Image: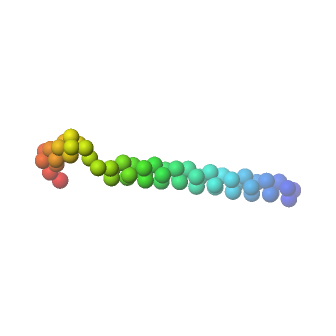
Amino acid sequence: DSDKETISENYESSNDEEEINTNDKIIDIDEENEELIDLPLSPLQEKLTKELVLFNPI
């Protein structure tokens, strides 16, 4: 019986680790997106952005 308990505990802990890893991946994706947003705009992108701001004032 004690062996079975140990196995179930190990299984549960491994599941917890998987969930944590999945959350880490989501966070990594968010960080990558932020880095992309922070990249300097090309002249064409800057022009389009300025025009969008003019058309859609916040």
Picture quadrant of residue 42: top left
User: Relative to residue 32, is residue 50 drawn left or right?
Assistant: left
Where residue 37 appears, as percent x and y from the top left, is: 33, 50
How many marks on residues?
0
User: Relative to residue 1, is residue 32 drawn left or right?
Assistant: left
Q: Nearer the viewer, residue 55 or 41?
A: 41
Q: How is the image coloured?
A: rainbow
Where residue 3 appears, as percent x and y from the top left, is: 85, 56
User: Residue drawn at (58%, 55%), measured in percent from left and top?
Assistant: 20
Picture quadrant of residue 16: bottom right
Rendered view: 42 above or below 58: above
Where residue 12 appears, as percent x and y from the top left, is: 70, 54
Q: Nearer the viewer, residue 3 or 1?
A: 3
User: Does the rendering let one see residue 10?
Assistant: yes
Quadrant location of the N terminus in the rendered image: bottom right
Rendered view: 45 above or below 35: above
User: Residue drawn at (83%, 54%), measured in percent from left and top?
Assistant: 4
User: Does the rendering let one see residue 52?
Assistant: no
User: Residue drawn at (66%, 52%), measured in percent from left and top?
Assistant: 15
Q: Nearer the viewer, residue 37 or 22?
A: 37
Q: Nearer the viewer, residue 2 or 35?
A: 35
User: Relative to residue 17, is residue 43 drawn left or right?
Assistant: left
Where residue 46 appears, as percent x and y from the top left, is: 20, 46
User: Residue drawn at (21%, 40%), measured in percent from left and top?
Assistant: 44
